[in-house]
Image (spheres, grey):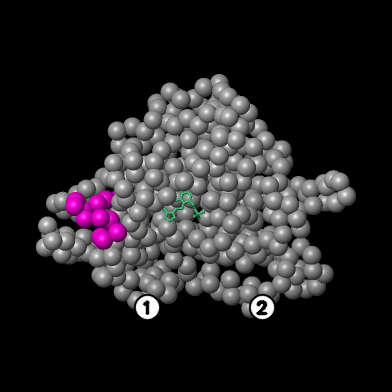
């Protein structure tokens, strides 16, 4: 198990942390990738490079073995069965797959779908589309004064017409953790299924899908030390089996007739064409890496940084902090009178990388009465020095923009 004192050793695994003075605080957008993941990708691309499931030669057997072993690693990581892991292009594709397959098949006119204004567009828009096409109702959980999803408010919108609940597990703007386990229990009592957006939770905390009892959860490789272009949809096997594929073609069929077709069982019926072989091997290597670091370390490091950062940011005059009670390493703020994009450019001069914008959460920006925010987001390889650099960059930006007021 890695100790907090090993942080410098961890930073050696990341090229940019080892070789530059970058302060990287845009981890909610994408994490950096450790050498171990790059080595795994290189191994596949250089030493194998071939297709899976179809070649009758040693290289193809090895590629198939690595691809399917990666699926088992994901299954062990979130505590589900091998056949419940569908590889997708990312969290967005996974969230869309639930809506376009489960939603289009099982949602009918007058049904209710519950979501929230805290959602990333990729969690909300697929259901907005289903609701429009199927003449169903899209219902929003009222957020509380802090803009959180609460059980009390969820109960206000849950009815016997609710068929699907699509909610984020951790907000990419406010850093709040949704009380999702209790929500899932309540949703199941009325027979609704729950699609959880795990893009910001799975990389940062131990997520056990069996313990949560969620029906679906979606996440991306690139936010958890893996490569871009790979994500995961976990679905309960019975549900996956009951759903139709949305893409058709190679590798997903049992037998093709001229007017009909039979499909493979899940997960393969959802993985049309040459699968994302390098990506899957990469997410497998990322999981090995995260397991080695351990969630005890990840959670304690992020919590330490959160407390350290909030203590300082709360004391900066003219800084609007939108989530002083964030549960994770995501902090959203603005400098009064300065556009967030100008703040981001000023930070860039100091080599501090953060994100400014609406964070693909425009409804939430309306709730916050902002067009955009500045967002700093941490991962386990960040240090107090990174926070000091952020605070210094804020102070410098304020001084600079004050000249123009
Ligand atoms: N859901 C949440 C909560 C997210 O934060 C993101 C990406 C997605 C879904 C979509 O993931 P993707 O990998 O398919 O793009 N969020 C962000 C962000 O906050 N800044 O850049 C991407």
Residue 184, relative to residue 18: is it above or below? above
Residue 163 on image: x %, y %: 58, 29
Q: In the visual, does 229 lie left or right of 84?
A: left
Image quadrant for the N terminus? bottom left
Is residue 336 shown to the viewer in this render? yes
Q: Earlier in the sequence, mark 1 or mark 2?
A: 1
Q: Is residue 342 magenta?
A: yes
The residue under the point 53% across, 69% down is 37
> Badge 1 is on which residue?
19
Q: Element type at marker 2? A: helix
Residue 164 placement: quadrant: top right
Q: Dot 2, how many residues are within 10 Å of its Cα: few (below 14), some (14-19), or many (20+)?
A: few
Residue 161 placement: quadrant: top right
**Do labels 1 and 2 touch, CB within 8 Å?**
no
The residue under the point 48% across, 39% down is 167
Residue 215 on image: x %, y %: 59, 38
Range of the magenta residues? 332-343
Residue reaching furthest to the top = 160
> Badge 2 is on which residue?
47
The residue under the point 53% across, 31% down is 113
Residue 132 circle label:
none
Image quadrant for the C terminus? bottom left
Q: Is residue 235 magenta?
A: no
């Amino acid at each position: 198990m890695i100790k907090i004192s090993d942080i410098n050793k961890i930073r050696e695994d990341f090229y940019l942390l080892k070789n530059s003075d970058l302060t990287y605080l845009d981890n909610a957008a994408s994490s950096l990738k450790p050498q171990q993941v790059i080595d795994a990708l290189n191994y596949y691309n250089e030493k194998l490079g071939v297709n899976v499931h179809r070649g009758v030669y040693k290289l193809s057997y090895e590629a198939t073995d690595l691809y399917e072993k990666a699926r088992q690693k994901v299954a062990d990581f979130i505590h589900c069965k091998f056949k419940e892991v569908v590889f997708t292009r990312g969290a967005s594709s996974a969230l869309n797959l639930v809506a376009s397959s489960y939603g289009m098949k099982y949602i009918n006119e007058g049904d209710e779908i519950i979501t929230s204004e805290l959602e990333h567009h990729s969690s909300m828009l697929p259901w907005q589309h289903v609701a429009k096409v199927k003449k169903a109702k899209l219902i929003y959980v009222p957020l509380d004064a802090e803009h959180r999803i609460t059980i009390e408010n969820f109960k206000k919108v849950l009815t016997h017409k609710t068929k699907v609940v699509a909610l984020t597990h951790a907000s990419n703007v406010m850093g709040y953790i949704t009380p999702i386990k209790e929500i899932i229990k309540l949703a199941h009592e009325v027979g609704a299924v729950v699609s959880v957006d795990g893009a910001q939770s799975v990389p940062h905390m131990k997520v056990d899908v069996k313990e949560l009892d969620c029906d679906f959860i979606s996440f991306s490789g690139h936010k958890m030390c893996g490569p871009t272009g790979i994500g995961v949809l976990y679905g309960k096997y019975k549900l996956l089996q009951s759903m139709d594929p949305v893409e058709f073609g190679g590798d997903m069929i049992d037998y093709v007739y001229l007017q009909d077709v039979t499909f493979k069982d899940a997960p393969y019926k959802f993985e049309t064409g040459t699968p994302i072989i390098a990506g899957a091997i990469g997410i497998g290597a990322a999981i090995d890496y995260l397991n080695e670091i351990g969630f005890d370390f990840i959670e304690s490091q992020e919590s330490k940084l959160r407390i350290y950062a909030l203590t300082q940011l709360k004391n900066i005059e003219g800084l609007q902090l939108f989530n002083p009670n964030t549960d994770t390493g995501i902090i959203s703020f603005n400098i009064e009178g300065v556009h967030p994009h100008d703040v981001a450019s000023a930070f860039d001069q100091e080599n501090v990388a953060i994100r400014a914008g609406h964070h693909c959460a425009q409804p939430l920006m309306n709730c916050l009465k902002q067009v955009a925010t500045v967002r700093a987001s941490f991962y386990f390889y960040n240090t107090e020095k990174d926070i000091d650099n952020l605070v210094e960059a804020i102070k410098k930006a304020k001084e600079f923009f004050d000249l123009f007021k």
